[in-house]
Amino acid sequence: MASGSWTLEIASSVEASRLFTAAVLDWHSLAPKIAPEIVVSGAVIEGEGSVGAVRQLNFSPALPFGYVKERLDFVDMDKFECKQTLVEGGHIGSKLETATTHFKFEPAAGGGCVLKVLTTYKLLPGAEDDQTETMKSQETVTGIIKAAEAYLLANPDAYL
């Protein structure tokens, strides 16, 4: 089985703490409000939102799959860092055996931040590593961050 990874850095003018909370920890609640054309609904379905919790995001027909379930494996609220694993939905079972994403929001000069993303995955036997899929995944993460950023800039009292 082949494995692979990709990285991404995204600069933002929003503080690390606010963007971390809105775009990662509370995305299941925020996404349906600000991106309903993509995310129809979302909820924590196991646990209480801390390590070990599982959340489900349900998508519109705009995506090639109907939902994903993600488990929160690690969170550091002081360092604005977390790791989550895709446990069901998406390409799990069709192309991927496993997929894990590590997010780290680093404060930047001037009050903004830089998000560093590392996604690692293991392909199912016979599946090929597809650079087009990697680019789509990177574009999706960038879109999530930029949508949350726009929301936070328009709502300066949100997620304080």
Image (tube, helix red, strand yellow):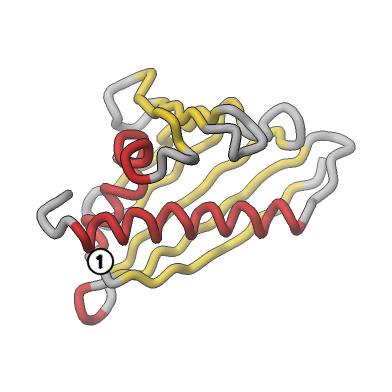
- Residue 96, by quadrant, is top right
In the image as oriented, which residue stretches furthest toward the top? Answer: 46
Residue 67 spot, x, y in % from top left:
55, 28
Crowdedness of circle 1 by 10 Å Cα count: few (<14), some, many (20+)?
many
Q: Residue at x 49, y 28 (%)?
A: 58
Could you say where residue 11 lies in the image, as x and y percent from the top left?
Answer: 39, 72
> How many marks do you count on the picture?
1
State the residue at coordinates (54%, 57%).
118
The residue sitting at 42% across, 36% down in the picture is 73
Q: Quadrant of residue 13?
A: bottom left
Q: Is residue 13 above or below residue 18?
A: below
**Side of 97 where 29 appears, left or right:** left
Residue at the spot 79% in from the left edge and 35% down from the top edge: 124
Quadrant location of the N terminus? top right
SS type, badge 1: loop
Q: Amino acid at mark 1?
A: Val
Left or right relative to 36: residue 76: left
Residue highlighted by disc 1: 14
102 and 157: which one is in front? 157
- Residue 1 vs residue 87: left or right? right
Give the x, y percent position of residue 22: 28, 48
Is 24 positioned to the left or the right of 118 in the image?
Answer: left
| Of the pair 126 and 41, the residue shown nearer to us | 41
Against 92, is 141 above or below? below
Between residue 83 and residue 158, name the one nearer to us: 158
| Residue closest to the far right | 126
Residue 100 picture location, percent across and down: 55, 43
Q: Residue furthest bottom?
A: 109
Q: Residue 32, located in which quarter of the rendered image?
A: top left
